[in-house]
Image (cartoon, rainbow, N blue to C red):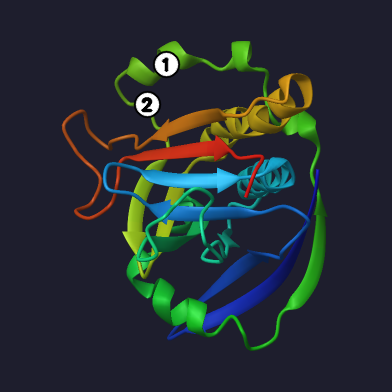
């Protein structure tokens, strides 16, 4: 998998953040804030870029992987007032507060270094190798946590969380190659910090990623 990015280093006060902004490729993808969940639509090339972004996030624990997806309109979406979102993938150990994102994003246009990341598909385990039963164990920490800020959905997790969920994202492209379906999708859910906790107010706890061949 290959992904073109621009590397930014942004300083806010005493803190500096490394942001990897994914550059537009051949594919298309758009993120829509729906009433009940968040929809991420992608064509086949877009699905490949999404999988590569998941792999990059797993390998970049000290960086924010930024996908500017507010390019709409979304396929099949008749609502001209639909709220489009960007997507940021980041490691939980970075400790980045989403409340700072608006300030950081505003500085991304000031230069940056082009970089192409080559990411092996072997980073993703086979679906039957994912340890789903461990999700129910006390102390499980390898899920994705959802947060929203500044018209952006943040997915925060461990490297393992991005590898496991990246396998599902990658399956959209492999299914398209094998079956050429008219509709294929995967769903990722917010993993609560405690059994009773919910996503922050105003943030959906479900991300529906749909392969969309026709735009």
Q: Is residue 138 above or below residue 150?
A: above
- Marks 1/2 in contact by CB < 8 Å: the verdict is yes
* Along the viewing direction, whichever of 85 and 82 lies nearer the viewer: 82
* Residue that mark 1 sits on: 134
Query: Does residue 182 sit above or below 202 in this rendering?
Result: above
Question: On the image, which quarter does residue 171 sit in?
Answer: top right
In the displayed structure image, the side of residue 7 where residue 192 appears, left or right:
left
- Which numbered circle lies on residue 140? 2
Q: In the shown orientation, is residue 107 left or right of residue 80?
A: right
On the image, the x and y values in percent for residue 74 come to 51, 55
Neighbor class of circle 1 (other Cα within 10 Å; few <14, some 14-19, many 20+) is few
User: Dot 2, crowdedness within 10 Å: few (<14), some or many (≥20)?
Assistant: few
Q: Nearer the viewer, residue 119 or 72?
A: 72
Q: CA distance from mark 1 to mark 2?
A: 7 Å
Picture mark count: 2
- Quadrant assignment for the N terminus: top right
- Residue placed at 46% from the left, 51% from the top? 93
């Amino acid at each position: 998998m290959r992904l073109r990015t621009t590397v930014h280093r942004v300083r806010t006060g005493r803190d500096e953040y490394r942001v990897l902004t994914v550059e537009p490729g051949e594919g298309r993808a758009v993120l829509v804030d729906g009433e009940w969940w968040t929809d991420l639509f992608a064509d086949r090339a877009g699905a490949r870029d999404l999988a590569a972004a998941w792999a990059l996030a797993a390998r970049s624990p000290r960086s924010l992987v930024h996908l500017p997806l507010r390019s709409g309109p979304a396929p099949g979406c008749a609502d001209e007032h639909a709220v489009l979102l960007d997507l940021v993938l980041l490691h939980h150990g970075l400790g980045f507060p989403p409340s700072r994102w608006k300030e950081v994003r505003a500085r991304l246009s000031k230069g940056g270094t082009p970089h192409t990341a080559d990411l092996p598909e072997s980073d993703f385990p086979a679906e039957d190798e994912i340890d789903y039963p461990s999700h129910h164990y006390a102390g499980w920490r390898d899920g994705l946590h959802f947060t929203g800020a500044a018209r952006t959905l943040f997915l925060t997790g461990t490297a393992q969380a991005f590898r496991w969920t990246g396998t599902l994202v990658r399956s959209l492209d492999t299914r398209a190659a094998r079956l050429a379906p008219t509709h294929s999708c995967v769903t990722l859910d917010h993993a609560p910090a405690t059994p009773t906790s919910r996503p922050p107010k105003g943030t959906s706890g479900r991300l529906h990623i749909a392969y969309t061949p026709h735009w």
